[in-house]
């Protein structure tokens, strides 16, 4: 794809998709009670795919969408400036992720601080994808993506199995970080944002870049959106065909999971672009645009607020006040929605003042 031929149009549907993923991230991360959550708002226990499993890779996909607009600016910069810009942004995102991991451990032993995390993976995937696209171009990025998915599969198959206990990614993380620095929520040290899975996760970013470039070059019209939807459907079908050999697994970030999450992201993007750009139905979009305009700040706010509420002993009592809503699951969801709305209000105030916090 020729970046120089791309128009400067900014598609509202891309901003809505970014805001949608952030809103969903907050909803699934802050239930009133983890013991009472509707099944679609939980990750698959191991193999499988739920709506919640769609959220994180779709956020990486929209990181790639943004690259379609920012990467062409690198063309006229010197190599040192390009490396500095990519490195600085990646380092800031990773540092913020480490800060979030440190926050719950303040006053406690840092020897038990988790090192991998969501923002750490985003920062690494952004850097790898940006460097690959800048230096290798579209064809090189496609070759990298194929090698990343197949290479990841090869490592999983040759050096372990697809189980929680025996997968190669866990073995690498135990050696690289140590057991005490990994996520402990699976009943044993295992990190779903570990080092090995970062490689295939980068493909989600690259796919988002290509989708963003395609929209910029072809425009949002019936033919281009049908092509996006067809590509999404093809990737989803390919993922399901691959799944008997390589299970769809978010925590391992398998290649079949990459294809399925990318395919469904393309379908959602095509639907949003049809509704917003083609049909002009925009009355509902502002809510998600608020999330999309201060994405990183709102996500950080949600995470810091949760830690503050838990440390202050307020999280559970606040959630309990919603018990009259109905079933425990309904009360848990109501808390998540109200918490998300509170985060939105903070973003709304920033938008009203035209304050946009970016890295």
Image (cartoon, rainbow, N blue to C red):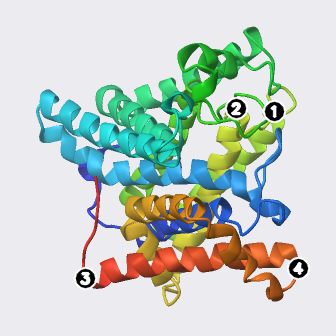
Mark 4 and mark 1: Cα distance apart in space: 34 Å
- Earlier sequence position, callout 3 versus callout 2: 2
- Earlier sequence position, callout 1 versus callout 3: 1
In front: label 4 or label 1: 4
Mark 3 and mark 4: Cα distance apart in space: 39 Å
The residue where tag 2 is placed is 252
For label 1, the crowd category at 10 Å Cα-Cα, with few meaning under 14, some 14 to 19 and many 20 or more, is: many
Instruction: Tell which residue pokes out farthest to the top in this image.
Output: 158
Instruction: Tell which residue pokes out farthest to the front in this image.
Output: 107
Whether residue 219 is visible: no
Local SS, label 4: loop
Query: Can you say whether 325 is above or below 101 in the image?
Result: below
Check if mark 4's residue and mark 1's residue have beta carbons within 8 Å. Answer: no
Please give the label number shown on residue 353: 3
Residue at left offset 56%, top offset 71%: 272
Local SS, label 1: loop
Local SS, label 2: loop
Mark 1 and mark 2: Cα distance apart in space: 9 Å
Mark 3 and mark 2: Cα distance apart in space: 42 Å
For label 3, the crowd category at 10 Å Cα-Cα, with few meaning under 14, some 14 to 19 and many 20 or more, is: few
The residue where tag 1 is placed is 247
Residue at left offset 67%, top offset 15%: 171
Please give the label number shown on residue 327: 4
**Residue 158 image offset from top left, x and y in percent:** 74, 9
Check if mark 3's residue and mark 2's residue have beta carbons within 8 Å. Answer: no
Residue at left offset 83%, top offset 66%: 38
- Earlier sequence position, callout 4 versus callout 1: 1
């Amino acid at each position: 794809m020729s970046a120089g031929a791309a128009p400067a149009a900014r598609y509202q549907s891309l901003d809505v998709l970014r805001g949608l993923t952030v809103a969903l991230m907050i909803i699934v991360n802050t239930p009133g009670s983890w013991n009472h959550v509707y099944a679609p708002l939980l990750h698959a226990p191991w193999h499988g795919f739920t709506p919640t499993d769609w959220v994180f890779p779709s956020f990486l996909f929209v990181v790639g969408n943004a690259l379609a607009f920012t990467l062409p600016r690198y063309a006229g910069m010197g190599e040192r400036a390009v490396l500095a810009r990519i490195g600085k942004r990646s380092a800031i995102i990773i540092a913020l992720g480490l800060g979030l991991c440190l926050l719950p451990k303040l006053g406690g032993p840092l020897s038990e601080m988790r090192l991998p995390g969501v923002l750490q993976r985003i920062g690494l995937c952004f850097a790898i994808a940006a460097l690959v696209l800048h230096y290798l171009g579209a064809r090189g990025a496609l070759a990298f993506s194929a090698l990343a998915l197949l290479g990841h599969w090869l490592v999983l198959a040759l050096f372990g199995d697809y189980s929680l206990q025996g997968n190669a990614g866990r073995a690498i993380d135990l050696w690289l970080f140590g057991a005490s620095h990994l996520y402990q929520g699976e009943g044993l040290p295992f990190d779903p944002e570990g080092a090995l899975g970062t490689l295939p996760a980068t493909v989600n970013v690259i796919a988002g870049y290509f989708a963003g470039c395609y929209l910029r070059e072809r425009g949002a019209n019936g033919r281009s959106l049908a092509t996006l939807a067809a590509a999404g459907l093809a990737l989803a079908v390919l993922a399901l065909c691959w799944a008997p050999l390589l299970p769809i697994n978010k925590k391992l970030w398998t290649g079949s999971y990459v294809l399925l999450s990318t395919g469904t992201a393309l379908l959602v993007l095509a639907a949003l672009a049809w509704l917003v750009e083609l049909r002009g139905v925009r009355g509902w979009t502002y809510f998600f645009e608020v999330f999309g305009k201060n994405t990183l700040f709102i996500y950080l706010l949600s995470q810091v607020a949760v830690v503050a509420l838990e440390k202050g002993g307020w999280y559970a009592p606040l959630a309990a006040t919603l018990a009259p809503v109905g079933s425990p699951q309904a009360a848990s969801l109501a808390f998540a929605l109200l918490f998300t709305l509170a985060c939105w209000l903070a973003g709304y105030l920033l938008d009203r003042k035209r304050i946009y916090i970016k890295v």
